[in-house]
Structures are given as structure tokens and as C-alpha cells.
Amino acid sequence: MIKGTARKYYMLGGKGGVGKTSLAASLAVKFANSGHPTLVVSTDPAHSLSDSFAQDLAGGTLMPVEGVDLPLYAMEINPEQAREEFRATTQKEGGSGVKDFMDSVGLGGWVGQLSELKLGELLDTPPPGLDEAMAISKVVQFMQAPEYDKFSRIVFDTAPTGHTLRLLSLPDFLDASIGKILKLKQKISQATSAIKSAFGQGDGPDKATDKLEALKEKMIMVREIFRDKEATEFIIVTIPTVMAVNESSRLQQSLQKEGVPVKRLIINEILPPSSSDCKFCAIKRKDQKRAMDMVAQDPNLRALQVIESPLFDLEIRGVPALKFMGDIVWH
């Protein structure tokens, strides 16, 4: 993973609460210690990257990791900001929702048509996974700026499984949404001025469609980065429980279907060997072995390289602890 100077993207994902953030941060420290200028980015709406580095990284700006002489930077993307940007793209700021808006211009009778078209999904509420997609697209835009050329390793601490899968389907969602706008435009041509108002002063339906087309292109770019076998690797993180392994299997199946390259599976929080187990530990170890056996037999997971990460007896917080973890896990 540390060989070569060409830029590589590593995306760590899986079920919530399996330790993605600690593992992503430890991988970033490992890369930086190996001489790679590294950026680690959290796109998880429930950020904990600041906790991992024991440093405030909120605000969506690039920040050097404190207290280390390493080429290591970190960033937390604010999902609420991404949602607001989406609302600004699709409706006038301060809009009161599709129904109230149509009522206000005397077109309340068309609300049923809007409901049928499900355009309200687009105008009122951003689709799940959009904050994740826009967060990653922001980083991609940053990468196109000259000052970001120095990073040869970019590590993403991604949102839980469902967000990741919805992210990959966003271009299709936006395709359907654009089609709904065009269909609406054809069905109610007399509402042109109202639609114009909904998308901001001076923006007609064509302009709105252009905005969504641009957003769709951005999402396609993000999806293609996910699928780039030369530059990208998605690493699935799980823990040794039946529920987590089953979810990881479904995730791998979906990623494979979407053409996302996956080589490694990390099984986190494995109980270390012990010569004298208490009753609780013995039961826990037996449950973990059953989950590990499931991985070995699962058709979606057994071809992956399995990396075992132990359950540590200390809190993994701060660069020294992350280095300690990384030296054990990433070898």
C-alpha cells in the first residue's frame, strides 16, 4: 500500500460503530510515517476524526495534524453545509415547500400531480447519501487545485454502509429527477413563472435542469473515482459478530456489482490470545470464532485478504496511539 508515488485513494467503510475512523486515521499516520504526504478526510455525518487525533478538525477546511513532524493533514466535511448547498441548487432560499409554494401561486390543484411525480423528494429533502457524495466531490475539487498536488495518499473515513450504496446510485436518482422536472414542465406550461420563482430569481426550468445536470456530472465523477481500479481501493471494516459479517457480505456484493475495487477486509476488535479466560471471555471468544468461520465460508468475502485487528486495552486517541495501532494492523 505504501509503494509508488502516484496518488491513491483509500476508502474505509462498513457498518456503523466498527472502528472505521480509528483505522482510517491509523492508516493515514502509517502513510505519513512512510514519507507520503497524506490527507485523511471524514465524510461520516457523525464525525469522530477530531476525537481520534485529539484535535478540533471541524469546519471543512484542510488542517495540519498537530504535534507531529509528518506530512499529515486532516479534514472533516460538514454534511449540513452540503445539504444546504443542495437546497440552494434546487430551490429558492427560504422556500416553504412544494405544496405551500404551489398554493401561494394559485396552483394548488397541481399538488396531486407533483405527488405523483415525487418531485417533492428532490425539492424539499436531499436524497440520502447526497451529503456523502458532495463531501467527496468537494475533496475531488480541492485535489484539482495546485496546492493539493502534494498529496500522494488520500484516506476517506466514509459514512455507514447505506450512505455509501446510495451514493453510488445518485447519478441514476438525479437522472430520474431531471426527467420529472421536464415532464412537469410539459404538463403545466402555465406554471413556468412559478417554477422560475422556485429555483431563484431569473432561473427558469431550463436553468434548473442545467443545475441538476451539473450536479449529476459531479456525482458521476465521484462514482468513477470509486470504480478506478488503478487509483482506488475500498476497504471493508467489520467486527467479529454475525450481524456485522452479514452486513459486510451484502456490502461487498453491492460494491462488486457497482464495479468498486475491494481487496481487503479488516476484522476489528478481535480478542487477543489468553491462557486463562473468564467465563464471559470464553463465550465471547467462541462467538467471535463463529463469525470468523462465517467470513471464511462466505462467497462474497472469502476471496478478500483478511486483516485481523485486535481489541486494544487502551483508547486509540492521538498520533502515538494511532501509530501503535497502525504498526500492528497495517503491515
Image (cartoon, rainbow, N blue to C red):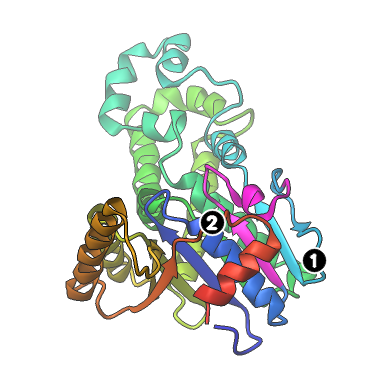
The region drawn magenta spans 38-56
Q: Quadrant of the N terminus?
A: bottom right
Direction from residue 183 to residue 207 in the image, left or right: right
Please check the rendered image and state whether residue 215 is part of the magenta-colored stretch, yes or no.
no
**The disc labelled 1 sits on which kind of residue?**
Val
The residue lying at 52 percent from left, 82 percent from top is 331
Classed neighbour count for the residue bearing mark 2: other residues with Cα under 10 Å, few (<14), some (14–19), many (≥20): many
| 14 is higher (above) or lower (below) than 4 | above
Residues at discs 1 and 2 in contact (Cβ within 8 Å) = no
- Examine the image and state in which quarter residue 283 appears: bottom left
**Which mark is drawn over residue 240?**
none
- Amino acid marked by disc 2: Thr
Q: Where in the figure is residue 58, as x and y percent of width and height?
A: 69, 44
Of all residues shown, which one is farthest toward the front? 276
- Which residue is painted at 56% across and 56% down in the image? 314
Q: Is residue 293 above or below residue 102?
A: below
Q: Is residue 17 above or below residue 230?
A: above
Mark before the other along the chain sequence, 1 or 2? 2
Q: Nearer the viewer, residue 26 or 15?
A: 26
Q: Secondary structure at mark 2?
A: helix
Q: Quadrant of residue 102?
A: top left
Query: Residue beneath label 2, please?
Result: 21
**Element type at marker 1?**
loop
Q: Is residue 193 left or right of residue 59?
A: left
Residue occupied by mark 1: 68
Q: Residue at x 52, y 43 (%)?
A: 45
The percent position of residue 64, horizontal first and vertical second, equals 78, 60
Asked whether residue 250 is in view, the answer is: no
